[in-house]
Image (cartoon, coloured by chain):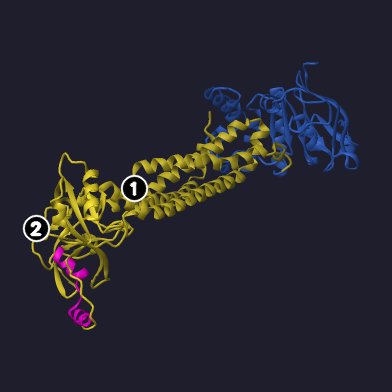
Chain colours: A yellow, B blue
Amino acid sequence: MINLAKRDIEHTLGKFIVTAMGVGMLLGIVLIMIGVYRGMMVDAEILLDDISADLWIVQENTLGPFAESSRVHQDMKDIIYVTEGIDKSEAMTFQNIQLPSPQKPVRVVAVGYDIYGSINPVNPNRLIAGRDLKNEHYEIVVTDKTGFKLDEKIKLGRNLYTVVGITHSTVSNGGDPLVYISLKDAQELQFLYSNKEIQNNEARGIKNSDSFMVNTIVARVKNGYDIDEVAKDIRKWQHKSVYTKEQQKEILTKNLIEKSAKQIGLFTAILVVVSTIIIALIIYTMTLEKMKEISIMKLMGLPNSLIISMIVKETLLLGIFAFIFGNIFAHLVYDRFPKRIVLEIPDAWGLFGVVIIASILASFVGVKKVISADPAAAIGG
Amino acid sequence: MNKDIAIKVQNLVKNFGKGENLVKVIENASFEIKKGELVALIAPSGAGKTTLLMMIGCVQEPTSGEIWLGEEKVYDNKWLSKDTRKIRREKIGFIFQAHYLIPFLNIIENITLLPQVNGVSEKISKQKAMELLEYLEIADKAYNKSSQLSGGQNQRVAIARALANNPEIILADEPTAALDAQRSISVIKMLKKIAQEQNVAIITVTHDDRILPYFDKIMKIENRGIVFHELGEDKIL
C-alpha cells in the first residue's frame, strides 16, 4: 500500500524540514529550560559534595551560610571537635565578593578554610592547574570560568593575591564561580574593618568586634555514631542550629531553588503548549493546502481512515523530526550559556513522550478538517 | 434487470430547501444508459447537471426515486448501503474538469492507489496501470509527477485512473473544459474507444458543442426532466 504521508513529505521535503527545524528550536529551548533547572540542582550540591560534611553547625535559629546570614565564633570548631562522636571539624566562611579584572569585574563566592585543617573544600579531582593553597596569606585558587591565569595577581581589599591553582566546574548554589582563600584572609576580608574605621568607631565609643568569626562549622561524624543523635547533642548543649548533609541539601534545593524551579516549570509548560499550538496550526495549514486532493480522494471512494492516517503520520513525523532538531540545537548551544545547563537523557525521553502526545492532539485539527471535507467539492471546478 | 444496462434511474427527484424556499432541481427523471455507451449530459448552467452526476455517483442523496448501477439497486428512496464510498470505489470512475491528480504521487501511484485500497496487490495493480498507460500511449511517463506532464497528458492519466478499478460507469465532469479544440476531440475519441472496448457506460457533462457529434446519445435536462436527443438534431447544437 502506498504510504501517502511519506510521499507527501517527500514532495515538500524542504518546507517540511524548515518547519521541523523551527518547531525543533522551540523544543530545544524547552530542553534547555529543563537543563537550567538540572544545572541549578547540580550547582547547589557541588560545594556540599566537595566539603562532604556530615553536619553543618550554624548560628542558632538560622538556616545556615547559604540561606541566611550566620556567624559562629571560630573556637566553636574545637568545642565541636571534642563532642562525642565527632571525627573532624573545621571552620569555614562563605562570602560574595567581586574580583577586579581588566575585562569585567567577576562576581564570585569566596570559600575561606583553614589550610592546615582536616576538611579541605578544594576537590583535588576538580583541580586542573596549579596546586591547592599552601601559605596562610595572599594565595587564591580560582575557577576556570573567572578567566584568571596561574600566577596572575588579584587585588582584594588591601592586598594582592596570587592565583596558585585553577579548578574546573566549581560554582556556588547560585551559579557564581567559587574561589578559595585561607581562613585568615577570608576573616580579614569579611570581618575586619579598615584601620580608619576602627579608629572612628573607638572615638565614638563603639566596641569593634573581633574578626575570629566564621559562617559555619562543618564536621564529620565517626563511624558507628548516629548522625542525627550527634546533631541533637550539639543543638542541646551548644545552642546552635545543626543540619545534616541531607537537610542542608533540602534547604538549598527546596528553599532556595523551589521558586526558580516553579518559574522554569511554568515557562517549560507554556513553551510545550505553544509548540503544540504551532504544530496544530502547521498541520491545519498543510491539510488546508490539500483539501482539493482530500475531496477527490473521498469522491473516488478512499476511506477516511486512509486519509486520517496520512495526517496523523505527518503530524507525528513532524513532531519526531522537530524533537531530533530540538536535541541537536540544544546540544549545540547549551555550553554558551553563562550558567550550567545539564541535558539529561531521561528528560529528553520525557519531552519525546510529551511531543508525541502533543502531536496526536495537534493532528485532531487536521483530522477534523478531513472528516468535514465534502467530496462534492471535487466536482464542478 | 437487463444485463446490458449500466445505469437505470426511475422517478428521480431532487429538491433543495423546504417550504417557501423549496427549489425543485430534478423532477421524476427516468432513463437508462447501456454499457458501452458514451452519453453527453447538457443543460444550461444551474439546471442540475452536476447534481444529477453526483446522485448517480452516490455522492449526493436524492430526495426520492430509484437508482440502479449495473444489476445492483443502490437507491430506493434511501441509500441501500451505508458505505456509499465502497460503491464508488468499486463501480465508478471519475474524471474532472482539471486532471486533479494527487501532486505528491507519481503517475503510476495515482493510478494504482484506488485498486490497492480495493485489495488488489501492488504488483497486479501496477501491471494493470502500465497496460492502461500503454493503451493511452503515455507509458513512458509512468514514474513522472503530474507537474512534469502537459495538460493533455495529465487528462489521459486521469482517464487511466478512472479506469484502474475496472468500473462499470465513468462519470466525467467537463473533462475537456481546460483543453483546446483539437485535444478536446482527441479526449472524447479516446473516451468513446474506452466505452466500446471496455464496455463501460460514460456520462460526460459538457458545454462544448464541437464535441457533441462524437457521442452516442445526448441527454438534456429540460424542465427539470431528462430528454434524449438523437445526434444531428439542430435544436441541441
Write the residue at 25% across / 60% down. A177
Location of residue B36 in the rendering, given as x and y in whole percent from the top left corner: 75, 24
Say whether residue A147 is left or right of residue B69.
left
Q: Residue at x 43, y 52 (%)?
A: A262
Q: Is residue A204 above or below residue A25?
A: below
Picture layout, residue B118 above or below residue B48? above
Report which residue position mark 2 lands on: A116
Q: Position of residue B86 (x, y in %)?
A: 67, 25
Q: Chain of mark 1?
A: A
Q: Quadrant of residue A302?
A: top right
Q: Is A270 left, or right, of A327 in this rendering? A: right
In-front residue for pair A210/A355: A210
Q: Is residue A193 magenta?
A: yes
Q: Residue furthest front?
A: A237
Disc 1 designates what residue? A343
Q: Amino acid at mark 2?
A: Tyr
Identified at 78% across, 39% down, the residue is: B206
Left or right of A303: which side holds B224? right
Q: Which residue is at the front of the view, B41 or B20?
A: B20
Instruction: Tell me which segment is drawn in magenta.
Output: A183-202
Amino acid carrying mark 1 in the image: Leu
Residue A99 at x, y percent in the picture: 23, 69
Which of the 4 image quarters holds residue B146? top right
Residue A169 in sight in this render:
no
Q: Nearer the viewer, residue B77 or A355?
A: A355
Q: Secondary structure at mark 2?
A: loop
Q: Secondary structure at mark 1?
A: loop
Please report, as a chain letter, where disc 2 is located.
A
